[in-house]
Each structure stands twice: as structure tokens, then as C-alpha cells.
Amino acid sequence: MSNSLIIGQYVPSDSFIHRLDPRTKITMIFLFVIFVFFANSAASYAWLTAFAVGIALATKIKIPFILRGLTPVWFLIIFTFILHLIVTKDGDILFQIFSFPVYSGGVIQGIAISFRFFLLILVTSLLTLTTTPIEITDAIESLLDPLKKIRFPVHELALMMSISLRFIPTLMQETEKISKAQASRGVDFKTGPVKDRIQAIVPLLVPLFVSAFKRAEDLAMAMEARGYQGGEGRTKLRELKIEKRDIFSFIIFGLVIIVLFLLRV
Amino acid sequence: MDISFKQVNYTYQPNTPFEHHALRNLSFTISSGSFVAIVGHTGSGKSTLIQHLNGLLRPTGGEVSIGPYQLMPGKKVKDIKVLREKVGVVFQYPEHQLFDETVKKDIAFGPKNFGVDYEEIEKRIPPILDAVQLPEELLERSPFDLSGGQMRRVAIAGVLAMDPSVLVLDEPTAGLDPRGQKEMMDMFYQLHNAKGLTTILVTHSMEDALQYADHVIIMDHGTKYMEGTPEDLFVQKDKLQAVQLDLPEIIQFLRKIEDKFQVSLPYEGQTISELGIQLKEHLKGDVTDE
């Protein structure tokens, strides 16, 4: 099942990237996502790609594995490329496909946008590949902390996030289990007319919802039994701490951005 | 239907960091009409093995044949539905698969998918309800209103309604009370005999394996560790303990008696009461000798 989709999957290792504070990673990725839109020359794109690939190498995760995980979004990237090719009407006409004139501007635009897309997805998937869901929610809670001043329920939001992340694999397993049980009773999820396949979802969804509700009830009961009462006065087992390596990475990142602006046209 | 595994391998998520070899070079045969127990501790590959029996998984190496059907790597089975009708699988906690509005519709779901016509399904239901000991009044109730034990019986009835000739049971008694466990196993044993089924039972319970199976396969780390009749296997205490399995209680008890009273009581499939009588005779004999 989840053989090809690796977005959201954590691969344990002890690389430099893995050990960075999750807040560092999230902040840097957030900034990277913004700065990708500043790239406007071949050199600046090449520079950002080199940076992203460098990080990917530093994670010690096998590159083919990471690329294979991106297969579901290749389609999207190619689609954007073709869209830009057709829609943009800049520069000289290069050639025609089915009476659609293709402009040189379109080709450049298409390549630029799909590269942007690729970079965004690559970098964000590197975040989830090197950071456990718990770390991510901890980091978000910590980053959103100032919002508590305006009574924004930061802790509750983080709790909701960590619970839903925690139960994704459980629900996936459950889905697989139930779909196997129903397949054994002759349900065909993969072939046949679309109408039949849509109907085949019902025997899958009903048990899934029933068990999700049961799980939610159990979890609520277990939390109450252990005296859970929200974020007030709650301490953490693992405090997040900014280390030297985080400062070091911020400096590197800053340099990368400065170079990026130098390479802009 | 005869079932045979020839050097079967199965790997989950090959070529990823999560690669896991669940079955390695597994070979065995199960002859038609036999009652086979598959024993092994958690993670030994039992669940992976049974998913090969109705083509939910295809081996990544080797060959599985179930009657006329063959499963090989990279080759799709054309009439997989026919295979799935012939091989009924009762998964662990089968009550989780219930979904329909009424018990009756849920039981009829399987056979309906396999194209059995309405009258035939109607005919099949009463004897099955009888076999799983459910009262007919429940037929129009929602399966979600029933007790846990009743829900499991409904789910099992749903598999039996497909009229399979091979029945695969994955820990069918897990989570039931001791009495429910015995009733459930007796029910499967009766069905096995009455319908001439080939039954494959995956279990942790050495007692069940000893009592019902005529052939036992012990799994360890995806390979076949031992195979044979329960009487032969369950006397090899050291070998069993090496894979974290215990002797069945009755045999443990016999060993203890032998040690304590210096008598030899071979196990020949006696029931507890027969054993009691034998034991009494042995001990009496000892007394008169003195």
C-alpha cells in the first residue's frame, strides 16, 4: 500500500539534519519557500537546487528513495509545465503543436515554474523525512507561543495536530485490514465500472468510521483517567533547545540567501 | 483442495529502508480435507502466509498453488474471484468488517458479490445461523447493536455463507471468554468434519493445536521451523522453547506426573477424564506393588 507515497514518512537516522532543532528546520523551510520565488535567473535556480540537493545528501537518506517518493507529484509538475507552455505568449514562436504556437517565453516560464514546484516539494518532504511528527508539533506549539497572548488556543491546536498525525498510520493499517477482509468477501476495489467501485467504498468506510469513533472515545477516556486538563501548567519531557549547530545552520542559510540575491538578474 | 507452497518468499516494501522479509524459502503442502494448525509467536510470518491462500498477496518469489490456481510473482491471476469464493478467510477480530444495515444483509454480502442468486442465499442462511448458534430473530437487527461475541458469529457466518471449501481462521478465538473460545473451536471442528473442509487455523494456543489439528506447522522468522503431527511435535520441549513456545498444558502436566511418580504415561490424544482414569490405575498399581 503506502509503497510509493513517502510524504509524511519519517526515516530514522542520526544525520546532522535529523539532529537539528525542529524549529530551526521549520523556520528555514518557511523562509526557503518564500525565497524560491525570488529566483529569476538560471544561475539562481541552479544555486537553490544545489542547496536543496546538498541538504538531501546531508540527510543520509538514499536519493533514489527520496525521488521515488516524489512520483505522485511528478504528474503535477509536468502538468504545470505543459500549462505554461500553452498559455504564455512571450518571446518568439518556436514551433507549433496541434496549431498551438509555442513561444520561447513559455518554455522558459514552464521550466522555471516546474523547477520551483520541484524544489518546494523536495524541501518540504525532507522536513517530514527527518523530523518525527511529535517534534514537528512541539516546534509548531513553540513557534506559535506568542499567539497565546491573544488567547489563541495554541496548545489545543498542537494537541489536535499530534493526535491526528499519531493516528494516520493506525487508520492506514485499519483501512488495509478492512479492505483485505472485504476483498476476501468478493469486493473488487480495483477493477470494474466506476459505479461499482464507488459502491465498493461503503463496506470500507462504515467499519473505518465505527472504529475511529471507538478509538476517539477510548483515547478521551484514557486522557481523562490520567488527569489531562489542557496546557496549563504542563511541563515537557523533551524541552526543545537551540544548539550551536542550529546557529551554524542559520548562518549558512543566510549566506545561501545572500548569494541568491547576488545571482538574481 | 490441495495447497502447496514451493520456496515462497515475500518481502514488504522491497528496495526501501523499510524492506522486510516476511517469508523466506517457505515450502509445505496441505492435503485436501486436513485440519492444519499454524503456530508461531508474533511476527513469525503467519498472517503474511495466510494472505497468500486467497491471493491477497502474491509471493515475491517461489510459487503457491491452491487446487487449480497458481500464484507466482509478477503474474496476475485471472479468476481471482473464484479463488476467493473457494477460500474463506476469517481474519482476526472479524467483527470489524461488519458494515451493513442488518445482520442478514451482512451475511448475504459475500455470496452476493460472488454472484450467488437470491434464493440460494436465502437457503444457505438458516443452517449457517444454526451452526454459529445465532437465533433467527437477530437477522433483521443492526449488527452494531449486538454483543461482541454475537458480532463475531455474524462475521463468521458471513464467510461461511460463501460456502468455501477451504476455511482459513486467523486466531478466531482471540478476545473471547474461555467458554466462548471452546464453543467457537468446537463449532469450527464440527463444520470441518461435516462439510469436509480443509481448515487452516492460525493460533497461539498450543492446546487448540493439539486438540483439533492433525498436522502442525511451526513458523519462526518467516521460515518453517518444524512440521509434523501434534503428538510428535509437542513432546520436543527444548526445541519449542527455543522459539518461545510452550508445551500444551496437558503434556506439561503429564511430564510433571512422570517426574514425580516415576511412571510413564505416553500421550495418545486422551481427554482429561481418560487421563484421570489411566493415572488412577497407574498409581493404584504402584500402591498394590508395595
Image: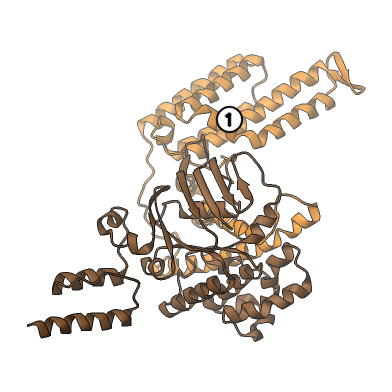
Looking at the picture, how far across and down is residue A224, in whole percent?
A: 44, 69
Q: x and y percent of residue A207 in the render? A: 62, 65
| Residue at point 33%, 60% (across, down) | B232
Q: Name the residue located 28 percent from the left edge and 69 percent from the top edge.
A: B251
The vertical placement of B89 against A146, above or below, is below
The chosen color scheme is by chain
- Give the number of marks: 1
Q: Amino acid at mark 1?
A: Leu
Q: Nearer the viewer, residue B169 or A104?
A: B169
Where A69 falls versus A86 (above or below)?
below
SS at circle 1 = helix
Give me the chain that's brown: B
- The quadrant holding residue B209 is bottom left
| Residue identified by numbered label 1 | A67
Q: Any idea which chain is the orange one in this picture?
A: A
Q: Nearer the viewer, residue B3 or A108?
A: B3
Q: Is residue A109 visible?
A: yes
Residue A101 in percent (x, y) is at 89, 20
- Look at 30% across and 72% down and name the residue there: B250
Q: Nearer the viewer, residue A223 or B100?
A: B100
Q: Quadrant of residue A112?
A: top right
Residue A66 at x, y percent in the picture: 55, 32
